[in-house]
Image (cartoon, rainbow, N blue to C red):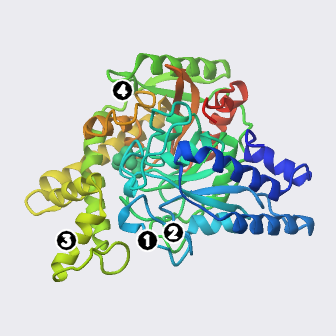
Amino acid sequence: MHTKTIAELVIELREKKISSQELVQHYLNRIKKYEPQLNAFVTVLQEDVLNEEAKKADELRAQGHAKLLTGIPIAQKDLFCTKGVRSSCGSKMLDNFIAPYDATVVRQCQDAGMILMGKTNMDEFAMGSSNETSFYGAAFNPWDLERVPGGSSGGSAAAVAGRLVPVATGTDTGGSIRQPAAFTGVTGLKPTYGSVSRYGLIAFASSLDQGGPMTLSAEDAAIMMNVMSGFDPLDSTSVEREYGDFTQHLNRSLSGLKIGIPEEYFGPGLDPAVGAVVQEAIKEYEKMGAKIRSVHLPNNALALPAYYVIAPAECSSNLARFDGVRYGYRCENPKDLMDMYCRSRAEGFGAEVKRRVMIGTYVLSSGHYEALYNKAQCVRRLVQNDFNTAFEEVDIILGPTTPNVAFKKGEKVNDPVSMYLSDVYTVGVNLAGLPGLSIPAGFAHGLPVGMQLVGNYFSEDRLLNVGHQYQQVTDWHKRMPAHV
Ligand code: GLN
């Protein structure tokens, strides 16, 4: 059961080959068996609650009221607020936080009939690339338990790769859906900024954060986008438009598709074994009739430094609300108000979050604002312009998702810059607000390699079509990790 995609499970449920109760119990048994080694979850819902939900789903189906995804299990990244269920954001600060309302994404999944199995582990406040900054300890990569699953949506990636759930949500501020998807051999889509609601998503950097699905196939990502995308008046940056059916063009031919290969994505820093896998994938696309040409993203090298000014700036502002007063952690026996503010934050936040808050406060301070923050915003525009120029010539931009395969736990945790470099091909896409899809493209050093496809604004249906066609002629996305 657990090797099946959502698309396949939906048919099995419809044809009554399985019931939702069997499905939920099966995944729950897998969670019980593998969670001790993967640490993919912060919270798993109680067995009786899950059985009750599954039973309701089966009843709806028996009455002929089932929707497409009724009774399909899902896990939510622990920064999506879930009413009545702890939403910790991977932080001690919110370890005791039970959200009083559901995030729009959570509500959408519920309205679609999906069953919330649990909340996934993540880097604290989504700041990290390895899941090691989580207050709950790192999640592990099911391909190699000594390695990280990537981050910040590492728990979601490990849960889907480990087949503990058929789908999980992630969020991507600088690469946090695509990089862990690449490291664990799953499919991850970071949608166009504004197409998935941020309401109820605990904020890191609001102009960059975007939720999206992590699945076993591009087709499943399309199915999930039908659930998750849409205008939300509760999110001021939600884009009001017709989102359409993301599954509609999955089978479109790729003949004549123009794919651009940015030279900047194949420069020094790229592991040659990863590069070779992506070159093979490019050949596969040529066989399918795509036209390959080289493009340039000349400002790509500036994307990472600009991101590490803008994201911390927004983080310092967003995280100011965690002051020990309203919700979350409060230190014991404060001497006075200032002591409570200071100690609650000092004790509640981990080292990486503090580093970001300090950098962000610095770059926004008078005297540095013009020189650093404003400059980074100018660079952001240059990065965006590069993509706009490239998309005048090509439909899709293709490259590796990350320069390396999953690294060992502890390898980069004391070297933030080397950790930040694992997002060197992904952050530009966030700065520009574009959609990016990572799909498994093969293996290097025995570990999964992700290929990133970037499309123009709101071209997710094309992007998913290009991913789906590749998955029709390859089976990388079906390979099972060694440890589950
Ligand atoms: N790894 C990047 C960071 O640490 C991106 C995180 C994310 O996308 N949430 O900021």
**Residue under the image location 56 percent in, 21 percent down:** 282
- The Cα–Cα distance between marks 2 and 4, rounded to whole angstroms, is 42 Å
Q: Are marks 2 and 1 in contact (CB under 8 Å)?
A: yes
Which label's residue is closer to the chain start, 2 or 3?
A: 2
| Quarter residue 74 falls in | bottom right
Q: Nearer the viewer, residue 297 or 333?
A: 333
The residue that disc 1 covers is 96
Q: Name the residue under label 2.
A: 86
- Element assignment for label 2: loop
The numbered mark at residue 264 is 4
Per the image, the residue denoted by label 3 is: 342
Tell me whether circle 2 and circle 4 mark residues in contact (CB < 8 Å): no
What amino acid does circle 2 point to?
Arg
Q: Which amino acid does label 1 sit on?
A: Asn
Residue placed furthest toward the bottom: 336
- Amino acid beneath label 3: Cys
Contact? badges 1 and 4 (CB < 8 Å): no
In the drawing, does residue 67 fall left or right of residue 92? right
